Amino acid sequence: MTPPLTPEKILHLGMAFWESKTVLSAVELEVFTTLAKGPMDMHTLRTQLGIHERSARDFFDALVALGMLDRRDGLYSNAPDADYFLDKAKPSYIGGILEMANARLYRFWGSLTTALKTGQPQNEAKEGGNFFETLYNDPDRLKSFMQSMTGISMGASIAIAQKFPWKDYQTFIDVGSAQGGLVVQVGKTHSHLTGGGFDLPPTGPLFTAYVESFGLSDRFTFIPGDFFHDSFPKADVLVMGHVLHDWDLDQKKLLLKKAYDALPQGGALIVFEALIDDERRKNVFGLLMSLNMLIELPGGFDYTGADCSGWMKETGFRKTRVEHLAGPDSMVIGLK
């Protein structure tokens, strides 16, 4: 017999912003950082956070129901994953991306319908601003953003270090390296490799400090540049992670061509993103990320592994393959 239809899925999806904003506000209020110091009762926790008595119990218990907090004998504590990833005092903190989502994306996504009708970004550009220009001109915001990029890409970076045949190569450059999260994971795992990161100049001090903190600065250095205006550094392997989706199709192909030109014969290009599955049915995160590019950038969009493989072959790469990494992320490998 066919089970009866219920509206539960529809209602949950339609009201999912309740759950999202509850978690984002908890990050903003530093609930998880505060509880990382130890379990607290409701009165102590709300007092430390500056939360009104009327809202405290419902707020904390909602976080319990969402699996973000635990409550035992009247004491609240962090769930294990929240404690690891959302305590600002830990190097594993990924809350920077959530802070940005709370401060910016949450309100901009309220204009998704307008974006769908107009095809135009709905962020600071509507008000004459530019998020990336502001970001790169503010050292504190840039540092927080780069740390969040390292955290959100950590699973993919570890997987690339483990899955790609690095033993066959000697040098690699991460193009759009940000803080250097991928460089560190690959460098720690494969001691024979040398190379570095290529990104806009303001990123340099952050990259250098991060790589140095892992004792890898003798093997990996920062190369300043603009990948649209400068040639790519030469290396056996080039990597572009969460880069191509920012740009329109012509710009994507330009970056792939610049990578091809910088590689030696036998060299490899790794492109990784939250690749949309080829049937465009399963990777919800990848599809929603593409809508996020609609909100954020004039021409950016996410794509499938088959799309990227086709562009690579059009550029000249002789062979490509797609491999899953972690979570929604997969990589496309092109061989010259």
Image (cartoon, rainbow, N blue to C red):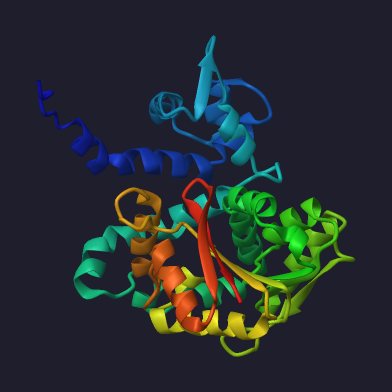
Left or right of residue 191, residue 103 in this image? left
Seen as rendered, the residue at the extreme front is: 318
Seen as rendered, the residue at the extreme bottom is: 229
Viewer-side residue, 288 vs 322: 322
Residue at image point 35% right, 67% down = 295
Residue at image point 14% right, 28% down = 6
Snapshot quadrant of residue 85: top right
Viewer-side residue, 243 vs 278: 278
Q: Above or below — where is 151 with respect to 123?
A: above
Q: Position of residue 198 (x, y in %)?
A: 69, 75
Left or right of residue 250, residue 160 in this image? right
Report whether residue 302 is seen: no
Viewer-side residue, 193 vs 143: 193
Tag count = 0
Residue at image point 39% right, 57% down = 276
Q: Position of residue 96 (x, y in %)?
A: 57, 53
Viewer-side residue, 237 vs 114: 237
Image quarter where the N terminus lies is top left
Q: Above or below — where is 55 with respect to 107?
A: above
Residue at image point 30% right, 41% down = 16
Q: Position of residue 235 (x, y in %)?
A: 73, 76
Seen as rendered, the residue at the extreme right is: 218
Q: Position of residue 232 (x, y in %)?
A: 66, 83
Image quarter where the C terminus lies is bottom right
Report whether residue 213 is seen: yes
Q: Above or below — where is 226 with respect to 74?
A: below
Left or right of residue 302, residue 182 in this image? right
